[in-house]
Amino acid sequence: MLFDSLRGLSWPSRRRALGALPGTHRSRLRGAAPELSEYRLYRQGDDPRQLDWKLLARSDRAYIRLAEDRSLLATWFVVDASASMAFPEDTRAKWSLACDVALGLASVALAAGDPVGLLVAHRATPARTPARSRRGTLSEMTATLAAITPGGAAPLAPLVGDLRPGARLVIVSDFLGDEPGTLVAARALLVAHSDVHAVHVVASEELEPSSRAIRAVDPEDDAIARPFDESMRARYRSNFSGWRDDVAAAWRRAGATWTTVITGEDPALAVRRVISASASGGLVAEAR
Amino acid sequence: MTFLAPGWILMAAVASTAIVAIHLIAWQLPRAVSLPTARFVPDEPARRAARTIRPSDLALMALRVAIVMAGGMAMAHPVMAPRPSGTATVIAVERPAATGLRDSLGGISRGDRTVFVVFDSAARVYTDEPSALGDAERPDPASGASVTVGLLGAVREGHRLSRDYASVDLVVISSFARSSIDAATVAVRDLWPDSIRVVRLPAEAAVPTPASVELSAGDDDPVVAGIRLAQSNGLVRGTSRVVRSVATAADTASADAGAALVLWPRAERSDTGRVDGVHVDGATALAHFVHATLPDSGRVVARWIDGSAAAREVPRGAGCIRTIGFDLPDAGDFVLTPAFQRLASALLARCGVAPAEGVAADSMLVRLAAPPRQVTVPATDHDGGASNRLAATLMALAVLLALAELVIRRRGVGASRMAPGVTA
């Protein structure tokens, strides 16, 4: 159902791809594509097959015929499967939405022929699915995510730092773990012409906690256990909203797109918003 | 153990109940709920009060109750003494004893223990009746009895006996002569919080003086009977001649010779008179009186309660003529009462001289007998040394327990601060 609603979508890269294999994304390479882009004076070392012989004959000048190349772009999904994603405890709506968004974006990328890989930050040993574009990759990703139960406090930064530059990276997380380290790693990739997309998953229960007096305990850090009642709601909202704004601004300043998806939202719509943020050159596409 | 101020125990019990009630309101931490964004919750201390059927902090509660109870018991002034029981009687007897002392003593109900206080100008304590009677009946013309002294001794013995006996009765047997009452008598009486049984006896003449009363009437005259009774009680002093009809020359001659001629005309026997009061010599006699006429001149020796003269006296020769303006009806026993005997004593006194020995008014006796409105409790020992030591020990115990409570509470607060998310 989700994949059907996303059929026909294109998800162009915001940056020129470094790949050599032909694909749908604009490449940083200019070669012998049928579509003329520009002429350039021949320089020693250029491929003589790209010489425009007719122009040489007319003007006695050697020009290289340059064309816009299109190539494939490997897309990596780094999905946060820490304990905070298993919220609420009864529905695990954050984890479900994160999986749906990742799989939906993967389906769009695979439809364009791009290889898609998956990294799941989960406890000590992260789950990894190599970047492939063959048939069955989506099923493999689905099986991998379905086998995972969020838990622990696995960091995202090491996984992001291990990725090769030039690929497209989609981080699906609530960013309540090692967000500063993850941003540092992502910034390194952005500098290396990677296309980074941050998808912030927020539970509606996090935006509006229960009105009953509770003792809020951080599932990833037992040391954080604070009484919460109605009198603290306004300040909690302010703190949480301020943090979200700060983090989003930091990621956008680094060159990444930032999209917040909230549990209860249609996953297909969330995927479209992520793609829309990418197509608009990284402009913000917030749900709220 | 008894407590001199048990109200403090009651207050401590009420305070302890309040402490237990406060401990029933336990501070409970709210239910722990997983919230990934818990870090954005303001880090402020917050606890919720909830009632519970089981007291919290049992050790602290027990300590606090113990502190309050120990302090309350210390303030209640505990006395390690056996609980008093039984009754005791303190009988104060005036010396020299008046007529009828033994009869009066026989009519007094005794408690488990009887102490006698024989008083004149000093008070002596006897524990056996024969010794007390022997002292009281010993003649001593020079001694003047003081009811104040007797009351002081009786009250002192009463307070002493009240430590060992649940009830102490005070009895004062005296003639209650006016000279035995002084300004301090009432104040001394108020030292005893309960009522005092007052037994008045006819006063003995301190100095026997020859008394001579000539009566010119038959034995069926009630006034004559009353005068004779007063004479037998020694209340009539001096020489007097009572004339119940018309005075003769011989009667006048007796006045000339120095006697008091008392003209006490007899009224009609059918006249029952009316209730009135005659005030003479500090005492008022209330009875049915038949009024008679009085001469307008002469010294007033008795007055009706409205102030008019009831008896007058005019000097004559060496004596005087005293005219009585009332008579008594034949019916009634007023003449047998002490009131009439005091009245007769005053009316038959020597000429121009007040009665040698007046008696205290009945109102004074009523005042002495009734419990005081405001009790003046004297400072008594009550085994004070041991009591103070016990109270000091209890107070020291309360202070020690308070220190222990402070230490335990500080530890409790420290432990709660160590707990995550919990602040005191």
Image (cartoon, coloured by chain):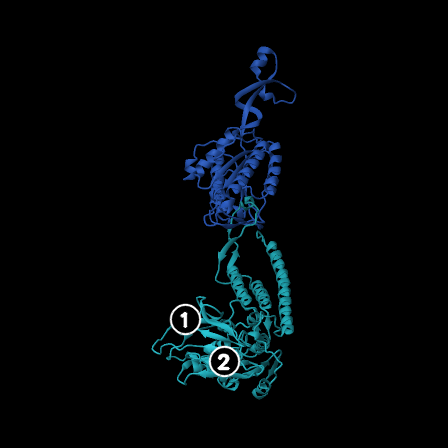
Chain colours: A blue, B cyan
For the point 61% across and 40% down, which residue is it?
A180
Badge 2: residue crowd in 10 Å (few <14, some 14–19, many ≥20): some
Provide the chain ID for the residue under circle 1: B
Question: Which residue is denoted by mark 2 in the rendering?
Answer: B253
Out of B104 and A107, give the one closest to the viewer.
Answer: B104
Residue A208 on image: x %, y %: 47, 43
Whether residue A264 can be seen here: yes
Question: Which residue is denoted by mark 1 in the rendering?
Answer: B293
Indicate the quadrant containing the N terminus of chain B: top left, top right, bottom left or bottom right.
bottom right
For the point 50% across and 45% down, which residue is it?
A231
Out of B241 and B398, give the one closest to the viewer.
Answer: B241
**How far is disc 2 from disc 1 in space, using C-alphas?**
24 Å
Whether residue A173 can be seen here: no
Residue A11 on image: x %, y %: 49, 32
- Residue B7, compared with residue B39, is above or below; it is below
Q: Which residue occupies the extreme left position in the image? A: B270
- Callout in the foreground (2, 1): 2
What secondary structure is found at the residue carrying circle 1? loop
